[in-house]
Image (spheres, rainbow, N blue to C red):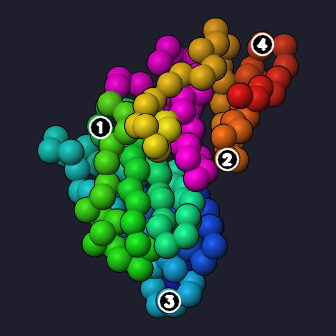
Amino acid sequence: THNDTNDYDYKVSGSNVVFEMNDGNDWEIFVYDESLGGDPVQLTDNEDNGNSTPVDDRFANLYRVGDELFITWARFDGNDYEIMLTHGDPTNISELQANIVQLTDNNFHDKSPELSEDLIVWWGEATPGNSDIFIYDIGDGVVENISNSPYPDFDPQVSGSNVVWFSDLGFGNEVYVS
């Protein structure tokens, strides 16, 4: 990128790159396809949520399956972060924009989504000070709390159907696998 702002939280899958950039109003998600060249394309464009609160799109991730690109991120809706998803032809930004759906709608932060071919995982803080790991199955559209722990669980990673995260037990972190 060559611009007058900072670009953050970049991820790559094949020739595709996704990252966040502040457009002067709020944070937006941009997509770049190295095989096409040119400039990054803005995926999201949210000024505010109707009450002058910026709608920030942050923490994007992507996964390419054949000719289809999946992109997930967290959107601040004025109250908390929710998980978003889109998919489509990586060369067709209009298709990616038209396919944006919101996966969560709750009253707590959902952040740091990661994805694989079949799953999206993230951490959500349903109880202040205690976060759990959530999973969304792209095939059946079901969201499930997979850690359901009394301790803070963070930083989920996914590969295929394998999910790992760490839990802060108060005397040290432990790694869990699901």
Q: Position of residue 17 (x, y in %)?
A: 56, 71
Q: Quadrant of residue 62?
A: bottom right
Q: Is residue 143 left or right of residue 34?
A: left
- Which marked residue is nearer to the observer: mark 3 or mark 1? 3
The amino acid marked with disc number 3 is: Leu
Q: Position of residue 34 (x, y in %)?
A: 57, 84
Q: Which span is picked out in magenta? A: 106-135
User: Total of numbered circles in the picture?
Assistant: 4
Query: Badge 1: how crowded within 10 Å, few (<14), some, or many (20+)?
Result: some
Residue nearer the viewer, 88 or 8: 88
Q: Position of residue 111 (x, y in %)?
A: 51, 38
Query: Badge 3: how crowded within 10 Å, few (<14), some, or many (20+)?
Result: few
Please report whichever mark, 3 or 1, sits nearer to the chain's N-terminal start. 3
Mark number displayed over residue 170: 4
Assign the C terminus to one quadrant of the image.
top right
Identify the residue under disc 2: 160
Position of residue 46 relative to residue 143, above or below, is below
Identify the residue under disc 1: 78
The amino acid marked with disc number 1 is: Gly
Q: Is residue 74 left or right of residue 64?
A: left
Q: Quadrant of residue 100?
A: bottom left
Query: Badge 4: how crowded within 10 Å, few (<14), some, or many (20+)?
Result: few
Q: Label 2, label 4: how many angstroms apart (C-alpha)?
A: 30 Å
Q: Quadrant of residue 10?
A: bottom right
The amino acid marked with disc number 4 is: Gly
Q: What element does badge 3 sit on?
A: loop
Identify the residue under disc 3: 36
Please report whichever mark, 3 or 4, sits nearer to the chain's N-terminal start. 3
